[in-house]
Amino acid sequence: MPHQPKKGDLVYLPSDITLIDDFTVEKWIKLDEPTLAVMVEPLINEEDIYHKVHVKGSDWYVRTIDTLEVMSRA
């Protein structure tokens, strides 16, 4: 099983994915370029569907399959 990111980890978000504000989806953004985000809450509701991340000044939900953990080589 791949390593799950933890709160505070840096994650990579590829371009052309959609982030949603919450599950009512009143607001959303589509990333037009790859972006780094900070993990706020991994595995929302303890399900492997969404993470909550902080990006572009706000918290957003992103699909877990759309995130890659930034690994340190140090």
Image: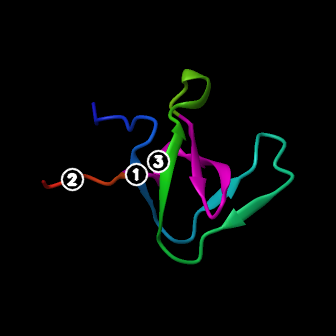
Q: Amino acid at mark 2?
A: Ser
Q: Is residue 3 magenta?
A: no
Q: Secondary structure at mark 2?
A: loop
Question: How far is the residue under mark 2 from the one under mark 1?
Answer: 10 Å
Where in the figure is residue 36, as x and y percent of width and height?
A: 46, 62
Q: Which residues are magenta?
A: 49-68
Question: How far is the residue under mark 3 from the one under mark 2?
Answer: 20 Å
Q: Amino acid at mark 1?
A: Leu
The quadrant of the rendering that contains the C terminus is: bottom left
Q: Quadrant of residue 5?
A: top left
According to the picture, the residue beneath numbered tag 3 turns out to be: 65
Q: Residue 72, labelled with which disc?
A: 2
Q: Nearer the viewer, mark 3 or mark 2?
A: 2
Residue positioned 36% across, 34% down in the render: 4
Q: Residue 52, labelled with which disc?
A: none
Give the main secondary structure, helix, strand or loop, of the magenta stretch: strand
Residue positioned 46% across, 66% down in the render: 14
Q: Quick check: 42 left or right of 59?
A: left
According to the picture, the residue beneath numbered tag 1 turns out to be: 10
Vertical side of 45 occupied by 17: above or below: below
